[in-house]
Amino acid sequence: MEDGKAFLAESEVSWRQITSPTGYCENWVRNLSSAFSAQVKKQFSIEWSELPGAALRERPFEVDMLRVPPGKRAWPRHYHSVQWEYYIVLSGEGEMLQADGEPPIPMAPGMHILQPPGWIHTMVNTGDEDLVYYVIADNHDDEHCYYPDSNKWGAGNMVFRPHEVDYWDGEDGPGPA
């Protein structure tokens, strides 16, 4: 069996553009960790193998390189339910915007920023050149996000807005027997 790709150069991974319909948010991303194909290794053997569950969670972390053009936000403001994110700024200038009333965190080369679950954030480029950074995130299967500016949730491949219902709605059975 082929061992799989366990190393790469950043230049081997293509940039992919992500832009909101109006262009308010824009970034270019290299999904670095997704480019690896190495499989889980058995504990007591040198043979490569796909262990049960490996397909559900290919890696315990995700590593991406992002470029945000001048004047753009990377994403809508959001927070993660269980995911931690670690940012390493490589070039450019920007700010990590937080919850309303919280001061922005400066982003400049050499800055390291840790975002725990529940912290509202997005990045905005305030400089004249691309803001470039790595983001390393632990990769939880049960992750969901909340977007406070638009009151929506994201889970899996679905984005939605919940509506309030009574606690017993749909749970009280078919009626008396």
Image (cartoon, rainbow, N blue to C red):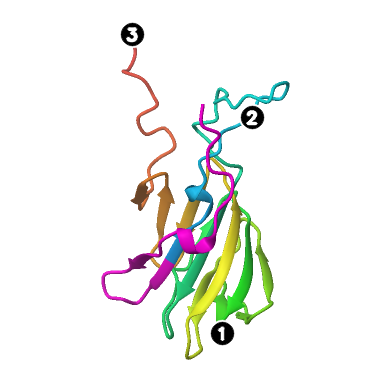
Would residue 113 be seen by someone viewing this image from the given angle?
Answer: yes
Q: Are marks 3 and 2 in contact (CB under 8 Å)?
A: no
Instruction: Sort mark 1 into few (<14), some (14-19) or many (20+) by Cα contacts within 10 Å.
Output: many
Find residue 41 and name its label. Answer: 2
Where is residue 42? Give x, y as percent. 66, 25
Residue range highlighted in magenta: 1-28
Sequence-wise first label, 3 or 2: 2
**Quick check: is 147 in the magenta stretch?**
no
Sequence-wise first label, 3 or 1: 1
Report the amino acid beneath label 2. Answer: Lys
Q: Which element carries disc 3, helix, strand or loop? A: loop
Q: Nearer the viewer, residue 46 or 126?
A: 46
Residue appearing at x 67%, y 69% in the figure: 113
The residue under label 1 is 93
Report the amino acid beneath label 1. Answer: Glu
Q: How many marks on residues?
A: 3
Q: Are marks 2 and 1 in contact (CB under 8 Å)?
A: no
Q: Which element carries disc 1, helix, strand or loop? A: loop
Residue appearing at x 69%, y 71% in the figure: 112
Q: Are marks 3 and 1 in contact (CB under 8 Å)?
A: no
Gap in Å between the C-alphas at discs 2 and 1?
41 Å
Gap in Å between the C-alphas at discs 3 and 2?
56 Å
**Residue 17 left/right relative to 42:** left
Instruction: Sort mark 2 into few (<14), some (14-19) or many (20+) by Cα contacts within 10 Å.
Output: some
Gap in Å between the C-alphas at discs 3 and 1?
68 Å
Residue appearing at x 47%, y 81% in the figure: 130
The residue under label 3 is 177
Extreme residue in the bottom direction: 128
Where is residue 89? Give x, y as percent. 61, 74
Sequence-wise first label, 2 or 1: 2
Report the amino acid beneath label 3. Answer: Ala
Quadrant position of residue 3: top right
